[in-house]
Amino acid sequence: MLTIPNLLTLLRVLLIPFFVWASLHDAFTAAFVIFVSAALTDGLDGFIARRFNQRSRIGALLDPAADKMMMICGYVFYTFESHVPMRIPGWLTFTVFIRDFVILLFAYLMYTRVHVSRFPPSWAGKTSTVLQAATLAAAIAVNAFAPGLRDFVEFLFRATVVMTLFSGWDYLRRGRKLLEDGWRAAV
């Protein structure tokens, strides 16, 4: 339970209120540092878990939950807070949330209906998640200390929505294949 990867994941969870507090108090540089630190610990805990065989069931559940909580807080704040100079467009936040909801619903249905318990992330899903995190970090950076990145962030908004939609389609395509294989095996 108290492995280094799990401790890093718990650290990420503990950073969420500080990230939200910094954002609410216009301390965008602090919010940026906290967000980037959380993203780096995410990569580090995964590396340590694989490299030193410290994978755990609790880590497999808590790690993606910690990531999603931080992303949800960031996307909601930087989309809906009216005083933020560089906001994330609502259409992007909607797309990110709907994709995650559809994947979660589909995974739940696959688990409860055909007992598919393993649905690993695809390269498209991982790329989409990295791009979503980079977009949020870049938007925070524009608010904090890099207003010159505004045009680049506008490009990231569009690239992120395209990759998010593609990864959602890819997950549904892969899930459909798993369902068809499961039905064939049952018959």
Image (spheres, rainbow, N blue to C red):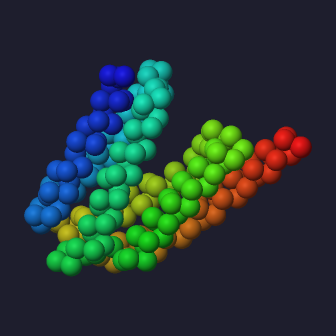
Q: Which residue appears farthest toward the right when viewing the image?
A: 187
Q: Position of residue 43 (x, y in %)?
A: 39, 40
Q: In which quarter of the image is residue 135?
A: bottom left
Horizontal arrangement in the rendering, residue 114 relative to residue 2 (left or right):
right
In the foreground, 64 or 85? 64
Question: Quarter holding the N terminus?
Answer: top left
Q: Position of residue 20 (x, y in %)?
A: 20, 57
The residue at 12%/66% (across/down) is 26
The residue at 64%/44% (across/down) is 111
Q: Position of residue 88 (x, y in %)?
A: 33, 73
Q: In which quarter of the image is residue 154?
A: bottom left
Horizontal arrangement in the rendering, residue 186 relative to residue 73 (left or right):
right
Horizontal arrangement in the rendering, residue 49 relative to residue 136 (left or right):
right
Q: Which residue appears farthest toward the front when viewing the image?
A: 112
Vertical side of 171 occupied by 89: above or below: below
In the foreground, 32 or 99? 99
Vertical side of 59 occupied by 175: above or below: below
Horizontal arrangement in the rendering, residue 57 relative to residue 33 (left or right):
right
The residue at 31%/66% (across/down) is 76
Vertical side of 82 occupied by 6: above or below: above
Q: Where is residue 163 in the image (x, y as percent from the top left)?
A: 54, 65
Label count reads: 0
The answer to whether any part of residue 96 appears in the image is yes
The answer to whether any part of residue 34 appears in the image is no
